[in-house]
Image (cartoon, rainbow, N blue to C red):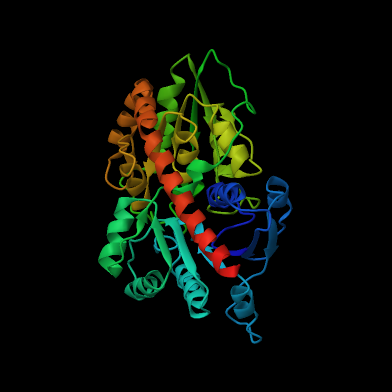
């Protein structure tokens, strides 16, 4: 059995993108036999870290290229029994880079044209501002063999766009393993983790409030810190989740987080090596506030009271699906309201924890149903091969 993985990153600054890869491989490791091989369609990178984490899974790598006169991409695709796509969870929306969406959607269509089954794994679908990209997405979705979304809003979008009724799951990163004992904190204090997004801090990739925030993000973070520092019982940790190697990387969190921690004399979390490391640190917090969605999933799935800061519909879709109301709406709330709600929710953190605990059965059921569906697809193909 050889499974192609499209849109799964091997080594990436964004630990949330890596989290999806680690989570899915963890699932595959438990549901298949020892003859499983996965092939990453991604730019060349070292597989050493993943192979050490998942020694039972054979791995190979090869990049799909549009300019390929020998059409090697066709043979790579056809060598797979089926291809799973996740495109870092955001492949069917053009809120970041429309050009990237064009190419990632084109690769999905190439898989379908080769006759290899394409499975669309749980991700966000919509919104699109570019109608041509939406038309491409519609074609790719309609010709996929298996379509899943990570929230009801995305499912409604798919139904309206394609008349297909997709399977509603949740984000696969809820299944990411972690080590709750790896990091220790001062138990005499209330340890509050704040994930500061370098992307939002810098105004987006175009530095002009790209996501149309109504909250002044820098002011929100600063006022929150200043208010919390007045409490003697609080220890504040500034936690990155996009670990850039280049300090000029506008999307990175590390340089921004270290600058904030230094300015306010706070604890700066380390530059994590992988998503499991990041989740292990986040799991040691008593409360967590995050602007990177997968940093908030790391907190939520380790039962840490969490306050997500939403800058796109993907947050609302994910957390509405879990009946979790403690979300800062960065595109509709005012800065004053965002700060006020955050401080009130921190004060009443047990309400957040109770809401999380109530939804864990639903999350477990979503993941269980997804694994069963995937196991059924794999068994069906194994039966055809035998």
In this rendering, does residue 206 appear at all?
no
Establish if 99 lies above or below 13: below
In the rendering, at what x and y percent does residue 231 appear?
44, 16
In the rendering, at what x and y percent does residue 17 appear?
54, 52
Seen at 55% across and 40% down, the residue is 240
Establish if 85 lies above or below 333: below
Quarter holding residue 83? bottom right
Q: Which quarter of the figure is the C terminus placed in?
A: bottom right
Q: Nearer the viewer, residue 186 or 71?
A: 71
Quarter holding residue 355? top left
In the rendering, at what x and y percent does residue 64 appear?
60, 73
Q: Which quarter of the figure is the N terminus placed in?
A: bottom right
Establish if 312 lies above or below 238: below
Seen at 68% across and 58% down, the residue is 35
Q: Nearer the viewer, residue 277 or 386?
A: 386
Quarter holding residue 126? bottom left
Seen at 43% across and 36% down, the residue is 221
């Amino acid at each position: 059995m050889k499974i192609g993985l499209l849109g799964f990153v091997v080594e990436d600054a964004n630990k949330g993108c890596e989290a999806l890869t680690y989570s899915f491989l963890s699932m595959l490791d438990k549901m298949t036999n020892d003859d499983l091989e996965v092939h990453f369609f991604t730019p060349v990178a070292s597989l050493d870290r993943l192979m050490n984490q998942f020694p039972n899974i054979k791995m190979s790598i090869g990049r799909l290229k549009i300019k390929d006169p020998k059409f090697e991409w066709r043979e790579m695709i056809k060598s797979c029994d089926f291809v799973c796509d996740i495109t870092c969870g955001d492949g069917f929306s053009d809120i970041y880079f429309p050009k990237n969406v064009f190419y990632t959607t084109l690769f999905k269509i190439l898989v379908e044209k080769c006759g290899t089954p394409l499975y669309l794994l749980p991700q966000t679908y919509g919104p699109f501002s570019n109608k041509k990209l939406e038309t491409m997405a519609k074609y790719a979705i309609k010709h996929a063999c298996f379509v899943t979304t990570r929230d009801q809003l995305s499912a409604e979008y798919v139904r309206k766009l394609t008349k297909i009724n997709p399977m509603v799951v949740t984000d696969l990163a809820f299944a990411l393993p972690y080590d709750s004992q790896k990091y220790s904190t001062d138990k005499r204090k209330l340890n509050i983790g704040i994930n500061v997004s370098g992307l939002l801090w810098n105004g987006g990739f175009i530095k002009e409030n790209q996501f149309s925030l109504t909250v002044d993000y820098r002011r929100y973070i600063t006022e929150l810190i200043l208010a919390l520092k007045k409490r003697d019982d609080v220890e504040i940790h500034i936690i990155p989740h996009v670990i850039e190697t280049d300090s000029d990387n506008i999307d990175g969190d590390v340089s921004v987080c270290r600058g904030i921690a230094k300015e306010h004399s706070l604890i700066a979390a380390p530059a994590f090596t992988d998503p499991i490391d990041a989740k292990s640190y986040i799991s040691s917090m008593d409360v967590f506030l995050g602007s990177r969605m997968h940093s908030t999933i790391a907190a939520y799935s380790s039962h840490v009271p969490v306050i997500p800061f939403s800058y796109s519909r993907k947050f609302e879709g994910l957390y509405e699906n879990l009946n979790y109301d403690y979300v800062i709406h960065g595109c509709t709330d005012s800065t004053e309201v965002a700060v006020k709600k955050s401080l009130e929710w921190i004060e009443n953190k047990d309400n957040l924890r109770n809401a999380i605990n109530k939804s864990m059965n639903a999350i477990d059921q979503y993941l269980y149903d997804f694994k069963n569906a995937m196991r059924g697809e794999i068994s069906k193909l194994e039966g055809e091969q035998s």
